[in-house]
Image (cartoon, grey):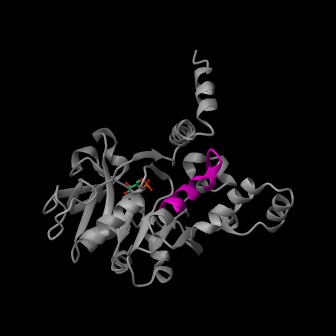
Amino acid sequence: MSVKKAVIPAAGLGTRFLPVTKSVPKELLPILDRPMLQYVVEEAAEGGVEEVIIVTAPGKEGIASYFQPSTELERRLSESGAQDLLDKVLQASRLAKVSFVIQEQALGLGHAVLTAREAVGDEPFVVILPDDIVHHTPGVVAQMAAVFDAVGQGVVAVEPTPWETVHNYGVVDVAPAACPNSGPPGHPEPVNGLGLHQVRGLVEKPPRDEAPSNLSIVGRYILPPEIFDCLERTRPGARGEIQLTDGMLLLLESAELYAYEFQGVRYDGGTPLGLLRASLEYALRRDDTRAAALELLRGIDTA
Ligand code: G1P
C-alpha cells in the first residue's frame, strides 16, 4: 500500500457532547468498550497505515495518555494472569506508531490538517475524522487505498444524503469518472466495484438550493502533500473556519480528485444519538454481546 501515514484531527471542542466533553475528549467516548478513536486507528492499520498523527488541542491530554503504556496496570494484569484484559489494554499502542501535534487555536479542520504538515512530510496521506465511524470489512481506508493505488490521485469518501441534510456537510460536484464501472483509464478491473466519480467542485455546508449534488463528504480523504500549500492559501470560509473542503477546491486547480462512494454503514459519532445507534448496532454484531443486547432491547419499556 502506498499510503503509510494518517492524520486524525481530534482538536475540536465537542460541543454537541457537553457537558461530558468538559473533561473527556469526544474522541475517547466509547462504543461499547473501546473509544471511537480506537476504531478509526484500527481501520487505518487495516488499510496499511503504519504511522498515525493525531492533532489534539490544549486540555485534551487524555488522548495522548490513552496511547501511552500504563505500567502499573499492565503489571497487575500480568501478575493476576488476566491475559485477555492485558491484550485489550495493549492493543491500541500495537496498532501503529502514534504521534501527536497540537493545534493551539481552533481555526478549523483545514487548519488542523495543516498543523500536521511537518509530521506528514512529502507523501500522500489519509485524513480520518474520528467521529465518522463506518462499519465494513474491509474498512473504508483499505477501500480508498485500493482506489488511490489505481488512480494515483486524491480520493474523498462520499455518500448520498437526504437533501434536507446536505447543509451539514461538505458536498461534491461530480462528473462520471472516465470509465465509471470498469475502473479508471488503463485499469480494466473495477475499482472496488463501482461508485467512483470525478470531482469538479466542492462546497462546504451549502444551503440546500445551492448544493451541487446530494453526495456528502464523509470523513475519509486520501490527499497528496500538495494539499498543504493549498491550505496555506485557504481563507476562512463556512463558520469563519479554514475548511479542508475549500483547500481541496484549490487543489483541483492543479490536480485531479476522485469521489468514492464507499461500502459500509456510517454512524455519526459526533452526536449523542448517533453514538447510541453505533453502540447498539455494534453490540448486536459482536458475538460476545449480541444475545444480551437483544434481551436488553426487548425488555425496554417504550411507553
Ligand atoms: C466535516 C467536514 C465536512 C464533512 C463532515 C463529515 O464537517 O468539514 O465537509 O462532510 O466533516 O462528517 P463537521 O462535521 O466538522 O462540521
Question: Residues in magenta?
Answer: 28-43
Q: Residue at x 54, y 41 (%)?
A: 282
For the question of whether residue 251 can be seen, the reply is: yes
Membership of 203 in magenta stretch = no
Q: Residue at x 35, y 50 (%)?
A: 263
In the rendered image, residue 287, in percent from the top left (x then y), is placed at 58, 39
Which residue reaches farthest top? 303
In the rendered image, residue 25, in percent from the top left (x then y), is placed at 63, 56
Q: Considering only vertical position in the picture, is 127 above or below 25?
A: below
Q: Indicate the quadrant containing the N terminus: top left, top right, bottom left or bottom right.
A: bottom left
Q: Indicate the quadrant containing the C terminus: top left, top right, bottom left or bottom right.
A: top right
Tell which of 289 and 102 is nearer to you: 289
Q: Residue at x 29, y 47 (%)?
A: 207
Membership of 29 in magenta stretch = yes
Q: Quadrant of ligand 1?
A: bottom left
Q: Considering only vertical position in the picture, is 13 above or below 103?
A: above
- 204 left or right, relative to 188: right
Q: Considering only vertical position in the picture, is 294 above or below 171?
A: above
- 43 left or right, relative to 32: left
In the rendered image, residue 39, in percent from the top left (x then y), is placed at 54, 55
Which of the 4 image quadrants contains residue 158?
Answer: bottom left
For the question of whether residue 59 can be seen, the reply is: no
- 209 left or right, relative to 138: left
In the rendered image, residue 68, in percent from the top left (x then y), is placed at 70, 69
Which of the 4 image quadrants contains residue 258?
Answer: bottom left
Tell which of 134 and 146 is nearer to you: 146
